[in-house]
Image (cartoon, coloured by chain):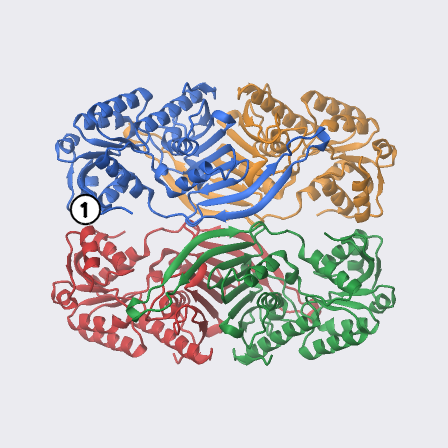
Chain colours: A orange, B blue, C red, D green
Amino acid sequence: MIDKGVRTVRVGVVGCGYWGPKLIRNFHSIPGSELSMVADLRQDRLDHIKGLYPSVETTTSYEALLDSSVEAVAIATPVSRHFEMARQALLANKHVLVEKPLTQNTEYANALIDLARERKRILMVGHTFEYNPAVEYLKSLIESGELGRVYYVNATRVNLGIFQKDINVIWDLAPHDVSILLYLLGLKPDQISARGSAYVQPGIEDVAYVTLNFPNGIMADVRVSWLDPCKIRRITVVGSKKMVVYDDVDPNEKIRIYDKGVDAPPYSDTMEQFRLSYRYGDITTPAISNAEPLAIETSHFLECIRSGKTPRSDGAVGRDVVRILEAAQRSLRNGGSSEHLAN
Amino acid sequence: MIDKGVRTVRVGVVGCGYWGPKLIRNFHSIPGSELSMVADLRQDRLDHIKGLYPSVETTTSYEALLDSSVEAVAIATPVSRHFEMARQALLANKHVLVEKPLTQNTEYANALIDLARERKRILMVGHTFEYNPAVEYLKSLIESGELGRVYYVNATRVNLGIFQKDINVIWDLAPHDVSILLYLLGLKPDQISARGSAYVQPGIEDVAYVTLNFPNGIMADVRVSWLDPCKIRRITVVGSKKMVVYDDVDPNEKIRIYDKGVDAPPYSDTMEQFRLSYRYGDITTPAISNAEPLAIETSHFLECIRSGKTPRSDGAVGRDVVRILEAAQRSLRNGGSSEHLAN
Amino acid sequence: MIDKGVRTVRVGVVGCGYWGPKLIRNFHSIPGSELSMVADLRQDRLDHIKGLYPSVETTTSYEALLDSSVEAVAIATPVSRHFEMARQALLANKHVLVEKPLTQNTEYANALIDLARERKRILMVGHTFEYNPAVEYLKSLIESGELGRVYYVNATRVNLGIFQKDINVIWDLAPHDVSILLYLLGLKPDQISARGSAYVQPGIEDVAYVTLNFPNGIMADVRVSWLDPCKIRRITVVGSKKMVVYDDVDPNEKIRIYDKGVDAPPYSDTMEQFRLSYRYGDITTPAISNAEPLAIETSHFLECIRSGKTPRSDGAVGRDVVRILEAAQRSLRNGGSSEHLAN
Amino acid sequence: MIDKGVRTVRVGVVGCGYWGPKLIRNFHSIPGSELSMVADLRQDRLDHIKGLYPSVETTTSYEALLDSSVEAVAIATPVSRHFEMARQALLANKHVLVEKPLTQNTEYANALIDLARERKRILMVGHTFEYNPAVEYLKSLIESGELGRVYYVNATRVNLGIFQKDINVIWDLAPHDVSILLYLLGLKPDQISARGSAYVQPGIEDVAYVTLNFPNGIMADVRVSWLDPCKIRRITVVGSKKMVVYDDVDPNEKIRIYDKGVDAPPYSDTMEQFRLSYRYGDITTPAISNAEPLAIETSHFLECIRSGKTPRSDGAVGRDVVRILEAAQRSLRNGGSSEHLAN
């Protein structure tokens, strides 16, 4: 699949917390990549990385990384640092992969998009799920028309989770579901509302619900929580012809297609005659590649650098997600108000 | 458990659709009950009942049932008929068990409560889940303090369901969850909001989400749908000490208690020192009686008739549920507005 | 499906223990059946039945039942009584449905077969699973060739079970799996062996394993236990092309077809070149009728009485199962010896 | 937990097929270990390892590895090479960790045991599951008496598996279950029998069943298969007081303890009075460490080297497992004969 004869890109990674090491592992092992430098403020983390990958240079100075010969920088630092670090990297003429969410606000996202265009550099956001083979399969199902008209989507992403100190659960977990929704539907929502509560840390919501109203009457609901006893990552897409459940936690059966539905007859003279007919057909679990989404994502990033093509999850998509999160945040503050998005 | 030496109560049932036959089966088989008459507008349904229970009298006339010697009437007709039929039964000095929801609106519910008090008759609403041993167990867990402070509740009740023509999915399914919540928490919500969409039948929501804000910051979210490929009936209660999942669909393990949680230290000098500690302890599945909730409910109804005591799910509880459904309905019509409930 | 215009057959049932009431319920409710008499030695059981079906005559005398006008008798008594009671019924010119296993030994089974032929009466054994829509579906899969050549079958039937006092777990549970195997494969085994142990009641095995070697190298293994914490009823059929799991405990997905397998290339020059290729294809869960197997079985019995056709699970099949159980029992006594069956 | 101040042991690994890379990863990352050399016949595999661990020396010559300064050698080559390679390593005064099964036959195993004793070197076999926290927990449950008397054990280890060319499924998969059984019960079996069939490769059984009879009437049955659509690794231990299921495939709930059982009363005058009473109590899922068993095993190996203490899975345990596999193999060839083991 991946041509091993490709030009090698030198990559630097900044941030060795939860996600950084996964990027490091991938940039170390995928073809056409040379992981040359890793930066973090904490020396102990750098020592750990050095132990695993002795050939990699490490530094506590982000400037040193930007001054090095790396062509591309992957940023896996706290969200509050994304904008400034990505800006510096673009100013240093590096291609940039930023972890999700792209930035803290739309303004910053737009600034990065403009700067990347100006500097002719790739700006990509790490919406990993857009590179998940199960999500790609689900998108192909929707586009083929096999599900019929999409009615609604329900998404749940909960766990006894890693609490963040600077962002709430919406900013932490919902970027996954929002980026999946935008990718699957190929649409942007008109309206957003959100409700949530903060139980463990005052002022930082650990449980939240986001409703997105898309064109064509498609409703999507996202439940996110850091406070749930079970790890659930589940998306249900209900169409007029078929229904699909995507269960990311199931190691073997991520996608299940239900040939189930309700048919209303084309017309009926009186309400009394109105009859619904239910279909209970087969359930199919397609064989899905178990390739690691992050390996696909990082390879895609390098491929875009080489070819100049626009990444699937480019700055514009990253900005759209941020705009939706901002609207959800406003709704949360306004007691669940319905926030309109001009598209 | 049940004393077989009790006085026998003669019972009539009206309505032989989906739920009626279950009431009929129970009033036919529980001790101290004599199922003497069944009414329905459709003769074919009555014939079917007669085939199963040859000793039972059947009639297409509700008046005939009210004129008969039955002491108690169980009403399992469409919601729009509840008020009028319950009123007539009370006026005929019958004790009344009405299926949920009690009535179409709060005013009707209050009228029935007043009439029952005046006539000194039992008015009970069929909130079956209040008689479910798993729900009772869950309530005892909460009351014992084992869960700590209750943070929030998440409830899901979805299926490829029986569509109703006169009521939407909130009025059809949410009464279960709302009555469970009131029973479990012993509190009434201050605020309600709801969102939903109608896909199969215009104007009749088949998918909906209801948020209830209770005192003490307890948030409860209820998801109901007639359009889901999987049958899910699941309630998660998250407390500060433990978390519980009640899965009504699981035949063997309805309640699972997770000794999991997050502890924040009592104080910390700086935000940097702030640390959360996670507990991942045992999971316990208590042995729960598999007695049929409807058998317990119908026995409770007869016991209240004999003893004069107030039913667990009396008219007042039925009215509270209706008031919440009304508020949810208003919110649904107002685009998800937050509806305040004066308690 | 079932013509309601058929001649009604008058049926008597003897035995109101665990299984009898299920037969009674079905003979009471299926079309073309009149449940006219029920016999049992215990009056309290008869009273219970009378309470449920007031129109049915009850008796503690089997002779009275045989003297009555019933055309057919269903026998649900302990195994040790099957032969004598079935013999008497046939001598009284009744058609007979005997619960599984047909008799305690092959000799008795052959005697019943001869008597039924002589008296021109239907002799059927209650191998319920042969009438289970999931088993029928599985048989159609095998016969269509979709699975390729059947390699082997693994069957597990365990629970914390109802212990029998007169028979061990092989005679109690294995008749189900053996009758399913004979039905699915359309073959009889050449060799049988069995191993087991008695833990709770001395001399009565509560845990056992039976191996059946069928022609064409097909191996079938059956695990039965009254001493297992989980209820498992699961049959795996592995074919050269596809594999199937039939999980009788799953309410929604009884059959799952795995398009999985291993292909060896037609030839290879050296062992080094030998390569196996794995196929990991889709999993399909076909929609299966959820009709009650016992309703189908009892209807089939009556249909055979009316038409004179041979039942699917006739005396010969019942005898074949008994012969296999006898061989398994011999092997159990002989320390797991391989017992040959002349076919 | 592990003291980082320990003396570092230089380790070499031979064999980079399926299992070798896991050993390599662990010897590279556990404290007190220096992975200094890796040997394999295939240069491409060595290149792959070199890519992941640039500091490690690689060689196609086992002699070179034995001539190097490594103190310890881990052998992950095909079984047929175990004896000769372990012998050479011991002769070169290296400590040796051999993958399971230790050797092809008991004679070889005894020769290695003698040689290790003579050379005063550690000989350990890679029975990974003896170092699995869930197995350790299960052993502590049995030893504490919480399960009561152990009645029987049922083990299933099936998958659509990696077929071996030189050994059948018993030699490939059963070492896991046999070593678990010896470890859990602290007993050796008196008798062994086995049945199996070869479907994909002539003469190499891909499906097999092994029965082990232990002292005190404990029966253990092991089902292994390379030809099953589902990955199952499940061990059920049934005791007189409680029952346990160990499901190695479940990521979160590996051990489930069922407070279930059957009690026979101490005595009864007549068989008629004999009553069994069932207990259906709670189910408990204890929190189990998710430490990697192989990390524990490799650390244990190094600790034994440093301290001179005998490994949990020493040569003698490795030999016992081989002796049981030999007996199973004999039984397989003799049509399921019962093979006695003199202990």
Q: Quadrant of the C terminus of chain D?
A: bottom right
Q: From the viewer's perspective, is residue C339 above or below residue C6?
A: below
Q: Using residue C24 as the reference point, say whether residue A298 is left or right of it.
A: right
Question: Which sits in the foreground, A77 or C94?
Answer: A77
Residue at the (46%, 69%) spot, across then down: C220
- Numbered circles on residues, count: 1
User: What residue would you read off at disc 1?
Assistant: B53
Q: Residue C203 appears at what percent x and percent y?
A: 39, 74
Q: Secondary structure at mark 1?
A: loop
Question: Which sits in the foreground, A81 or A287?
Answer: A81
Location of residue A138 (image quadrant): top right
Question: Which sits in the foreground, D6 or D247?
Answer: D6
Q: Residue D35 appears at what percent x and percent y?
A: 81, 58
Residue at the (46%, 33%) spot, across then down: B223
Q: Residue C109 appears at what percent x and percent y?
A: 28, 75
Q: Using residue C335 as the reference point, say whether residue A202 is left or right of it.
A: right
Question: Which sits in the foreground, B32 or D340?
Answer: B32
Location of residue A19 (image quadrant): top right
The answer to whether one can see residue B146 in this image is yes
Badge 1: how crowded within 10 Å, few (<14), some, or many (20+)? some
Q: Using residue A181 as the reference point, say whether residue C16 is left or right of it.
A: left
* Chain to which the residue tagged by mark 1 belongs: B
Q: From the viewer's perspective, is residue C125 above or below residue C288?
A: below
Q: Using residue B213 as the reference point, say whether residue D169 is left or right of it.
A: right
Location of residue D191 (image quadrant): bottom right
The answer to whether one can see residue D37 in this image is no
Q: Residue C126 appears at what percent x and percent y?
A: 30, 64
The three-letter amino acid code for the residue at tag 1 is Tyr
Residue at the (76%, 39%) spot, across then down: A16
